[in-house]
Image (cartoon, rainbow, N blue to C red):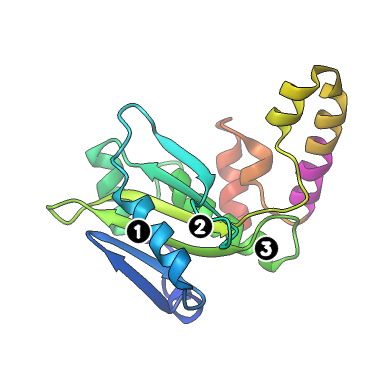
Amino acid sequence: MSPDSSAWPKEYTYTLKHRRTTLHFQAPLAEHTRAALERLVERARVPGAKRISAPLDCERSLLFAKREQLDSLKKKWRVQRGAARSDGTYDWAVEEIINTHKAYQRGAPVPELVGFGYTRSRLGLVQDLFVITRLLQGYSDGLSVLQQDPSSVYRVLDASTELMFSLHKQASPTWTCGPATSCSATARQARR
């Protein structure tokens, strides 16, 4: 599933299989965390939603889950084979897994990648990807801060810019590039 899957089984040796979903973790799961993940897997796919991100429905686990619904046969086939897109980058969730893992290992201020996984369709193709990280504590969501106090826009921009520069120093370009096409070469260089 991943372009660098040969390295991951050593670190993510614990597996949770539920229905057609397989999730890989670094450590065994507590029962309350396992139950919350099973509930996440059982949630119906949300029509029109490409990505869903939220804290895991279990306060004791302190995990954050991201789920991307692969919306085209081309994308499903590419992710299934661990292949890059024509520009040399991988699909969003695969890039997220790789970059979060590497950035945390390098000491960047990002949450630790706790696990990742996928759901297969009845035909066996990957249809959903999961990225599971630690829930950041002591940090505020910029959107929530702005909704509570619109005058704090400069403080949020300063904090965001500081984080982007910090990540750039750690050679994690996915977070610094955004959707611009010029970022593809930078993302490829970081993986080398």
Residue 102 in picture, x, y percent from top left: 62, 63
Q: CA distance from mark 2 to mark 1?
A: 13 Å
Q: State the residue position of label 3.
A: 104
Residue found 57% across the figure and 56% down from its top: 59
* Residue 147 in the image: above or below residue 19: above
Residue type beneath disc 3: Tyr
Residue type beneath disc 1: Glu
35 or 174: nearer the eye?
35
42 or 68: nearer the eye?
42
Q: Earlier in the sequence, mark 2 or mark 1?
A: 1
Asked if the residue at tag 3 contacts the one at tag 2, i.e. Cβ–Cβ closer than 8 Å, the answer is no
Q: Is residue 4 at all visible to an observer of this figure?
A: no
Q: CA distance from mark 1 to mark 3?
A: 26 Å
Residue range highlighted in magenta: 161-169
Mark 2 closeness class: few <14, some 14–19, many ≥20 residues within 10 Å: many
Query: Mark 2 or mark 3, which is nearer to you?
Result: 2
Mark 1 closeness class: few <14, some 14–19, many ≥20 residues within 10 Å: some
Q: State the residue position of label 2.
A: 132
* Residue 188 in the image: above or below residue 145: below
Residue 32 in picture, x, y percent from top left: 46, 66
9 or 44: nearer the eye?
44
Query: Mark 2 or mark 1, which is nearer to you?
Result: 1
Where, by quadrant of the figure, is residue 20 drawn? bottom left
82 or 134: nearer the eye?
134
Callout 3: SS? helix
Residue found 60% across the figure and 38% down from its top: 183
